[in-house]
Image (tube, helix red, strand yellow):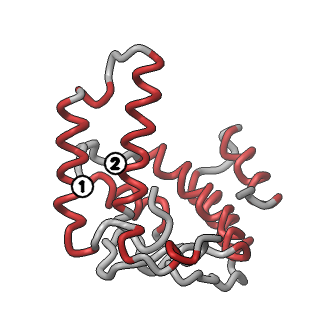
Amino acid sequence: MTPGDATMRAAAGYEQGDNDVSALIDAADRETSGIVSGRLADGSLDDHATDHASSVFARTVLLAERRWNPSGDLAELVAIHRGLFDGVFSDAGRLRTSNVTREVTDKRHQAKNPEAFFPAQLIETGALNISTELADKRNLDNLDRGVFVRELAHVYDELGYLHPFREATP
């Protein structure tokens, strides 16, 4: 996903101190205002909806500037999701309430598999397990590079399976 030209010009102005982050968001939203979000059966974005890159980029800058409460739990994921996608998706920061399948696959037996993602009714439990595991590993702090990469990949995989949001899990 690549932000559009107008957004990149506004980002350069932000970087140089010529405008604030709200001007960057305004430019990005103007650039993507005509986009109609396409959805795949699993709720993820199709190729046309990647045109939201400008809005998501601008909100990433906003999120980095304003920060969020680093609680290390599901509330932190919700805050990040809301920060990145508020104004982009109507359900920004809201947990998935139904099970989804991954119909975008070459393997038909996996396409309709309801276990492709963690069950919606257990998202809070799954998130607690992941955050507890991270806390037990001191949030992957002070690890050798190889161990860090392996542990980070494991957590990333678990979060991907948890898939707590309908759209764009951070």
Give percent across and percent down for residue 112. 47, 81
Q: Residue at x 60, y 56 (%)?
A: 58
Q: Residue at x 72, y 72 (%)?
A: 47
> Relative to residue 128, is residue 11 drawn left or right?
right
- Whole-angstrom CA distance, mark 2 to mark 1, is 18 Å
Q: Residue at x 22, y 57 (%)?
A: 126
Occupied quadrant, residue 3: bottom right
Between 118 and 85, the one lying in front of the other is 118
Q: Check the image and name the residue furthest to the front.
A: 109
- Going by the numbered disc 1, the residue's amino acid type is Ala
Between 78 and 113, the one lying in front of the other is 113
- Going by the numbered disc 2, the residue's amino acid type is Trp
Occupied quadrant, residue 169: bottom left
Tag on residue 16? none
Tag on residue 68? 2
* CB-based contact (under 8 Å), mark 2 and mark 1: no
| 16 relative to 145, above or below | below
| 145 relative to 57, above or below | above
Mark 2 crowd level (few <14, some 14–19, many ≥20, 10 Å Cα): few
> Relative to residue 12, is residue 104 drawn left or right?
left
Between 86 and 122, the one lying in front of the other is 122
Q: Residue at x 68, y 65 (%)?
A: 28
Give percent across and percent down for residue 98. 32, 82
Instruction: Give the foreground label among 2 and 1.
Output: 1
Indicate the quadrant containing the N terminus: top left, top right, bottom left or bottom right: bottom right
Give percent across and percent down for residue 23. 63, 59
Disc 1 designates what residue?
127
Mark 1 crowd level (few <14, some 14–19, many ≥20, 10 Å Cα): many
Label 2 vs 1, first from the N-terminus: 2
| 3 relative to 109, above or below | above
> Relative to residue 100, is residue 3 drawn left or right?
right
